[in-house]
Amino acid sequence: MMEKIETIKKSNRLVKILSSKKAKYIIGTVLLSGIGIALPRIFHILAGASAGATFLPMHIAVLIAAFTFGVTSASVVAGSSIVCSYLLTGMPTIERLPYMLIELIIYAIILGILNKKFNSYISLIATIILGRIIYAGILFIAINGLGLSTYGISVTQSIIAGLPGIIIQLICVPFISKTIKKGINLND
């Protein structure tokens, strides 16, 4: 009888710990990092080698993290997704890795900040526009100021190629984020 009571107490403690806001934040960030690694692979398998540039699957996990958990979580998702994806699959290439890392962290920071002040859609649209402008500025400095190679990166080409991904982001990301927030009840 005493063993059963102790087991119930331990079980209740575990439930309490796992239902805390901090645990939800950590578990959500880890899961979104995994999605940030898996989703690009799925897109590449289903739609070919150019699927990443077209559908921007890694951006999805970062944007959801920014909406749901904020800047820090989204930055962790960006960094871990990029680095782990490279280590596991070789994608993005080592030459593109730093540029993609910078791009995704820019999105994480901007959306994490704007989402506190504006609704989801305004925040996301502004993030996509401001993110591309800042990213273009960084590329300009890297190429012209530091003499680094572009490795075929063009902001204009990436916007045109990524239009399907941007549309997917605008349609799906706010809805998914809202659903996750409601489901995990971060107010605890």
Image (cartoon, rainbow, N blue to C red):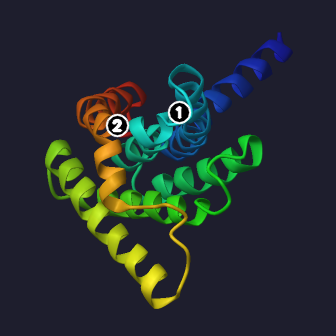
Report, in whole angstroms, how far the alpha carbon at label 1 lies from the one at label 2.
33 Å
For the question of whether residue 115 can be seen, the reply is no
Of discs 1 and 2, which sits in the foreground? Answer: 2
Q: Quadrant of residue 35?
A: top right
163 lies left or right of 81: left
Q: Residue at x 31, y 71 (%)?
A: 134
Q: Position of residue 80 (x, y in %)?
A: 63, 52
Residue 143, which numbered label? none
Location of residue 147 with respect to 121 vertically, above or below: below
Amino acid type shown at disc 1 = Ser
Q: Residue at x 52, y 65 (%)?
A: 99
Q: Residue at x 53, y 47 (%)?
A: 22
Quadrant, the C terminus: top left
Q: Which residue is mark 1?
A: 19
Q: Quadrant of residue 162?
A: top left
Q: Nearer the viewer, residue 40 or 8?
A: 40
- Within 10 Å of the Cα at label 2, are there few (<14), some (14-19), or many (20+) other Cα atoms? many
Q: Nearer the viewer, residue 81 or 98?
A: 98
Q: Position of residue 66 (x, y in %)?
A: 38, 50
Location of residue 13 with respect to 99 vertically, above or below: above
Q: Residue at x 34, y 53 (%)?
A: 157
19 lies left or right of 174: right
Give the secondary structure at mark 1.
loop
Q: Which residue is mark 2?
A: 165
Give the secondary structure at mark 2.
helix
Quadrant, the N terminus: top right
Amino acid type shown at disc 2 = Gly
